[in-house]
Image (tube, helix red, strand yellow):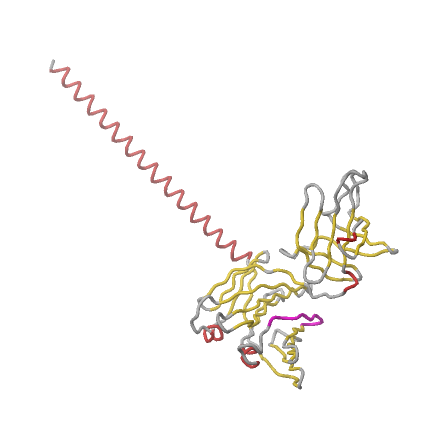
Amino acid sequence: MNFMVKDTYKNKDVMNNILKDCVKNVVLVSLLLIFGVNVYECKKQGQNINDKITISDDYLELNLEKIKINENEKNIIYELGSSVLKNVFINLDLEKESAILKIEDQEILIGLNFTYDINIEDAIQEIKILKNKNGNIIFLFPTATEEYLTFQILKYDQQNKIFSDDHFYFETHDDIRNLYLNSKASLFEKNNSYLLKIGTFQFKGAFQMINTFKNEKWDGVYYYNPYKRCDSIGNYYIDIKSGHSDFGFSGNSSFSFDITYKEINDSLHLYRADDSKEIGKIFEDKNQFWIESNLVENKEEATKTNIFPLKYAKSADDIE
């Protein structure tokens, strides 16, 4: 009996030692796993931060000179310049109370408010300009100051000579005009989305391309029927009119989205309004309109071309 008791105690001791070793191993493995996960997450976060830094398009505020170069009863013209910015002018139409920005050979009507609840000198003083390494430019124009300080944020793509814009405002009734004037602005952009920083304030938004081209010769509806069978219904259409233009398809799997446009070398280039990507162009050849676009296809037979003939109507009511 004594031998059996001793053996039993010995077996318990062995089992306890084994359990202790197992617990130690489990704890050690768990700590190693936790450490490994933390290292991976830190490395991943570090990579994400670096990615944000490398992919961001960085705009910095310029030190501006705002010089009045001409004034009469109808107009006042200011030049906005710096050591890295030339040929930028703002023409204030005193009769229409409207303002035109001229940069290089491009002109655009802007939302600068220089009469309502503000005077001309203060309005000009509140203009800020930012520029990135590619030469693209951001303008900040005050549009309202009565309740919330509100701005038009206008982007100029220098290479493609395209304008896009958005609006932002300070959501506070506090007197932040001095903060705005005395704080440097910076902007980070990716795929037309932006983060604007002015002092302690941050604003997120997205640029929308806007038309500067005005020519009534292109107004109307251009459409293409991709079917040969008379019982098939549907047209690709491009509706060009002042204020709002769109591109779409009216048959099965229909779609529609807003577009902007620009005339280049006698062709009308079409762009998506939400991301400024070019989607095609309309041109005329031998009294026939054509569209060149990868978004258009013949629905009944494969074709090797992305150029298709267009019919024209003055409005949607006149489509055959």
For the point 55% across and 58% down, the residue is 56
Question: Which of the 4 image quarters holds residue 135?
Answer: bottom right
Q: Is residue 1 left or right of residue 76?
A: left
Residue farthest front in this picture:
317
User: How far from the left and from the top, in percent, is residue 48?
Assistant: 49, 51
* Residue 282 drawn at (x, y percent): 78, 55
Up-down relation of residue 249 to residue 81 (above or below): above
Residue at (49, 65) in percent of width and height? 197
The picture places residue 128, in percent across and down from the top left corner, at 55, 73
* Quadrant of the drawing holding the N terminus: top left
Nearer the observer, 108 or 243: 243
> Magenta residues: mostly which secondary structure?
strand
Write the residue at 45% across / 73% down: 176
Asked whether residue 226 is drawn in magenta, I would say no
Q: Magenta residues, as a range?
A: 103-111
Asked whether 210 or 7 is in front, the reply is 210
Q: Residue furthest top?
A: 1
Provide residue 223's location: percent of width, then percent of height. Answer: 77, 50
Q: Is residue 235 left or right of residue 60?
A: right
Q: Is residue 68 above or below residue 151?
A: below
The answer to whether 9 is drawn above or below residue 231 in the figure is: above
* Most distant residue in the right direction: 286
Q: Is residue 175 left or right of residue 7?
A: right
